[in-house]
Image (tube, rainbow, N blue to C red):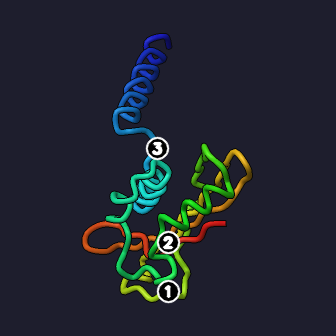
């Protein structure tokens, strides 16, 4: 009985070790790309964030730096972004891979107020690109 318990504990320890070595919980590639985009914007690395923008982004949202700064004025810094969920993207924006698109939603906690951020992301050129977003 004691020997079986030791074997079970050893197997559990190995399983936990493997889990931690693999990076913990698995995150979908689309969610990872959306988090990276938001992180770059929050760190004011607009040029790097610009590389994640799709050519299909609507014209009124092309100046994402200005829109982001306006949102930060409303939310206040420092802002914390918590991914809430990822759902299949359902948007009217035309994109060649719209059927594979995702909407990653974030809860925003700023110094002045709380808000909502949605990143619409789709596979493009071997990676995930932002083709729309909503800042509220």
For the residue labelled by badge 2, is the local secondary structure a helix, a strand or a loop? strand
* Horizontal arrangement in the rendering, residue 100 relative to residue 114 (left or right): left
- Give the residue number, with chain letter if any, for mark 1: 93
Q: Dot 3: what SS?
A: loop
> Residue at coordinates 44% horizontally, 26% vertically from top-left?
12
Which is closer to the viewer, label 2 or label 3?
A: 2
Which quadrant: the C terminus?
A: bottom right
Question: Measured along the vertical axis of the image, is residue 39 above or below residue 130?
Answer: above
Contact, CB < 8 Å: mark 2 with mark 1?
Answer: yes
Residue under numbered circle 3: 25
Dividing the picture into quarters, in which one does residue 13 lie?
Answer: top left
- Point out the tag, 2 or 3, that comes first from the N-terminus: 3
Q: Position of residue 74 (x, y in %)?
A: 68, 58
- Disc on res. 120: 2
Q: Residues within 10 Å of mark 3 (few under 14, many from 20)?
A: few
Return the residue nearer the eye: 55 or 100.
Answer: 55
Image coords of residue 79 (percent x, y): 61, 47
Q: Which badge, 3 or 1, is on the more N-terminal residue?
A: 3
Label 1 sits on a secondary structure element that is loop
Residue 21 versus residue 125 in the image, above or below: above
Q: Nearer the viewer, mark 3 or mark 1?
A: 1
Please, is residue 22 above or below residue 86 in the view?
Answer: above
């Amino acid at each position: 009985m004691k020997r079986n318990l030791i074997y079970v504990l050893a197997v559990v320890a190995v399983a936990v070790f493997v889990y931690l070595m693999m990076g913990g919980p698995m995150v979908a590639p689309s969610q990872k790309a959306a988090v990276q985009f938001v992180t770059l914007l929050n760190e004011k690395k607009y040029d790097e964030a610009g590389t994640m923008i799709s050519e299909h982004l609507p014209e009124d949202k092309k100046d994402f730096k200005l829109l982001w700064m306006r949102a930060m004025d409303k939310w206040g810094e420092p802002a914390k972004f918590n991914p809430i969920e990822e759902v299949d993207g359902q948007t009217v924006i035309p994109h060649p891979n719209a059927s594979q698109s995702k909407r990653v939603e974030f809860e925003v906690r700023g110094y002045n107020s709380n808000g909502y951020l949605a990143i619409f992301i789709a596979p493009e050129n071997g990676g995930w690109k932002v083709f729309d977003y909503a800042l509220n």
